Every structure is written in structure tokens, then in C-alpha cells.
């Protein structure tokens, strides 16, 4: 009896398999023209994408990096006007971004933004720094803090405080202390002593070994007294 049940199950399995194969064949025969059309279209798209990346996008990125190199060297040397705007012989970062956009890499937006900050061009700095798309947390925090500097330069202190606190939360390291100190000082300017004190105490508790941490007691004392 048990053997018969096994044989029945095996026969049923084979019947189901044959039925599935039959239905698959039937579906293919009814739709093979459509199937092969879709396959061909996908293949053409894949080849087009591959050709674009290899023949256009990657060479353009290499060209952008080459064009940006002199400006990046000027930036590293602290020549912010030359780095941002060039000199007529080589492109500045602003020219590179206009010509190549993101193909020049994320760093050019950070560098252009910092150049604009140094030159007091705060709206332009915001424009560049908001387009920075780097994923490394410390650099991402630096770009956000740069936005805070630009807002502060525009006397938009509430936006600046929001940027500084966001930057401090983006990367938990000693740089966060500097961002929190800037936020605290602006909170005092805005008359919010409680928030300022909160920033200062975070520096004291979490970053006592930072440069800001060594002098933080005077800020705490000032905020508490006021």
C-alpha cells in the first residue's frame, strides 16, 4: 500500500511537471515575438549605457579632473580668488562646475563653497555647499557647517544655528565641538541662553579634550550668569 502511494505521488508530480512545461511552451509559442522584442530592446539599452559610460562619461570625468587640478592646487595654497575664478589661462572651480557639473567630482563643490566663504560671497557659498554630495561623514559635516558660516555671514542666525547643530550630529568627532561652540554663541546672540548653555555643556561632557573644551567653562559661566 505504501509503495502504491509513493508511485501515485510520483505520477502526480510528473503529471504536474509535464503540465507546467506544456503551459510554458504554449506561453512561449504565443508570445515569442514579444519576448524576443523585449530581449532585444533590453540588450540595445544595456549596450547603449555601456557605450555611454565607457566612451563619453568616463573620458569626460577624466577631462574634468584634469581641468580642475590647477584650481585645486590654488585652493590648497590658500589662493581662494584664483582657485574660484581662475586667471584666464586656467579654469577656476566655478568654471569647472559650470562646464562639467558633477563629473568633476563632489570635492569641487566643497572647495568652491569654501573659496566663496573666504571671499565673503555667502549666497554663492551656499549654492555650492548645498550641492556637495560626498558620503564621508566628517566631510559631509564640514559642508553643512560651511552652510552655517554662510548663513551667519548673511545674518540669518536661526538657519546658521540649525546648520551647525546638524553638522555636529552628522559626525561625532572633535570637529563637532567647534560646530557646537558656534551654535552656542549664535544662540546667545538670539537671546536663547538655555540653548546656548546646552551646547556648551555637550562640549564639556563629550569633547573635553578638544580645543573648544579647554575654554568652555568661561562660556558656561557667562551663559549661566546671564
Image (tube, rainbow, N blue to C red):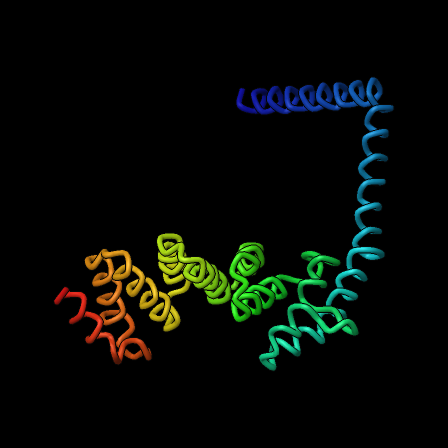
| Residue occupying the point 83% across, 45% down | 48
Q: Is residue 85 left or right of residue 140?
A: right
Q: Position of residue 185 (x, y in %)?
A: 29, 65
Q: Is residue 135 above or below residue 50?
A: below
Choose top left, top right, bottom left or bottom right for residue 11.
Answer: top right
Choose top left, top right, bottom left or bottom right for residue 95.
Answer: bottom right
Q: Is residue 35 left or right of residue 157?
A: right
| Residue occupying the point 56% across, 21% down | 5
| Residue occupying the point 40% across, 54% down | 156
Q: Quadrant of the N terminus?
A: top right
Q: Residue furthest left?
A: 225
Q: Position of residue 62 (x, y in %)?
A: 77, 66
Q: Position of residue 177 (x, y in %)?
A: 33, 70
Q: Is residue 171 left or right of residue 67?
A: left
* Nearer the observer, 21 or 67: 67
| Residue occupying the point 37% across, 62% down | 168
* Nearer the observer, 12 or 1: 12
Amino acid at each position: 500500500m505504501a509503495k502504491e502511494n509513493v508511485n501515485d505521488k510520483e505520477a502526480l508530480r510528473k503529471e504536474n511537471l509535464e503540465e507546467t512545461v506544456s503551459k510554458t511552451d504554449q506561453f512561449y509559442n504565443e508570445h515569442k515575438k514579444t519576448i524576443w522584442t523585449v530581449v532585444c530592446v533590453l540588450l540595445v539599452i544595456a549596450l547603449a549605457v555601456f557605450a555611454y559610460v565607457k566612451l563619453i562619461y568616463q573620458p569626460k570625468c577624466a577631462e574634468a579632473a584634469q581641468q580642475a587640478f590647477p584650481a585645486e592646487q590654488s585652493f590648497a595654497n590658500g589662493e581662494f580668488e584664483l582657485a574660484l575664478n581662475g586667471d584666464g589661462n586656467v579654469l577656476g572651480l566655478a568654471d569647472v562646475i559650470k562646464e562639467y557639473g558633477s563629473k568633476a567630482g563632489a570635492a569641487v563643490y566643497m572647495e568652491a563653497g569654501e573659496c566663496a566663504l573666504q571671499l565673503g560671497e555667502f549666497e554663492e557659498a551656499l549654492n555650492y555647499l548645498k550641492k556637495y554630495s560626498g558620503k564621508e561623514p566628517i566631510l559631509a559635516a564640514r559642508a553643512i557647517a560651511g552652510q552655517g558660516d554662510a548663513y551667519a555671514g548673511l545674518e540669518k542666525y536661526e538657519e546658521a544655528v540649525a546648520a551647525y547643530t546638524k553638522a555636529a550630529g552628522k559626525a561625532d568627532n572633535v570637529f563637532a565641538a567647534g560646530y557646537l561652540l558656534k551654535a552656542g554663541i549664535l544662540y546667545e546672540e538670539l537671546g536663547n541662553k538655555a540653548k546656548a548653555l546646552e551646547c556648551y555643556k555637550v562640549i564639556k561632557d563629550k569633547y573635553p579634550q578638544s580645543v573648544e573644551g579647554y575654554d568652555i567653562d568661561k562660556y558656561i559661566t557667562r551663559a549661566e550668569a546671564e
